Image: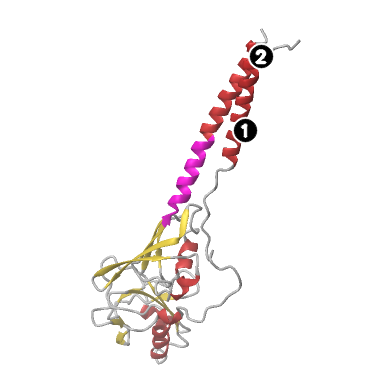
Amino acid sequence: MIKFMPAWHRYQNKTIFCSTLFVIFALFSLSSCRLARDSYYFNSIKKDTSISKFVNQSMELKIQKNDELSIVVSSLNKEEDMLYSSTPAATGGSLSLTGSTNSTQSMDAGQAPGSYWVDSLGNIKIHKLGMVHAEGMVLKELANKLENDLQPYLKDPIIAVTFSNHKVTMLGEVRQPQILLIEQASLTLFDALAKCGDATVDASKKDILIIRDSANTKQFIHINLENLSVFNSSYYYLQPNDIVYVSTNVKKVEDELRRTNTQQSLAISISVASLLIVLINTFGKK
């Protein structure tokens, strides 16, 4: 005689089977959520390579009108050094070239000690030298010129020249957004990123926006750091007043948010399915 399974047993087994399939499907869906591709520097370089055309140090910043220069002079003539500075530096006997009461250099309001503005003719005023043309020179050239010109007045003079008002603004997906000073002759895009603690994990390294003022216009240039094209770009070396905005990898952020929401929804569904199975097993046996 054929024994038929009681109806509630058939219902129970069918429910358990369906619930199990649902749990398996949910787990499979959860594991199949694909993570968004991370963005890496030079991601397109698959093997060793080299480039022959790239932007080199010829892009070194040159002194221009309205630049502010920090000039420090030091020599073996300490008394003569005092003519070039009203207050000696704290260490090393180096003296800021601020100009004393006998100097032709006057300090503008708000101008830091040791700072010299390049005037509308491209000149700066130096004690005993008078007007010195600085426009068009790089920092090292001006330092060498001042050292040579001051030889008759100082013994073994050593001159250090840096920029005081050159800055770059770093914004967006960097760990420490800030304003960077370009004190030396040049600052590369990678140097600027390193000074800000590098880009964040959510940054899109193939979409770096550089905003630059040029001849009464603003240029908006997108740089891709995932390939070697950055080394051929005239924007590899940053210019004064550049704004660097590191874009967000929107697709990655959206995918991760979608993945998180999916995980939460599946976790709730699995919990509900597990609860139903427990209830069916519990009340089905009564």
Q: Nearer the viewer, residue 153 or 39?
A: 39
Residue 157 position, x and y percent, is 45, 85
Q: Main secondary structure of the magenta part?
A: helix
> Cα distance, mark 1 to mark 2?
22 Å
Query: Where residue 243 sits: x, y (%)?
Result: 35, 63
Q: Is residue 239 part of the magenta span, yes or no? A: no
* Residue furthest top in the image: 286
Q: Quadrant of residue 219?
A: bottom left
Residue 16 relative to residue 92: left or right: right
Residue 87 x, y percent position in the rendering: 39, 71
Residue under pointer 1: 24
What's under tag 2, amino acid-wise?
Answer: His
Q: Which of 253 and 265 lies nearest the eye of the viewer?
A: 265
Indicate the amino acid at tag 1: Ile
The residue at 31%/74% (across/down) is 67
State which quarter of the image contains the N terminus.
Answer: top right
- Say which residue appears at 32% left-offset and 77% top-offset: 99
Q: Earlier in the sequence, mark 1 or mark 2?
A: 2
Q: Nearer the viewer, mark 1 or mark 2?
A: 2
Label for residue 141? Answer: none
> Which range is magenta?
247-263
Under circle 2, the secondary element is helix
The residue under label 2 is 9
What residue is drawn where x is 54% and y is 28%? 269
Q: Position of residue 33 (x, y in %)?
A: 55, 43
Q: Residues within 10 Å of mark 2 (few under 14, many from 20)?
A: few
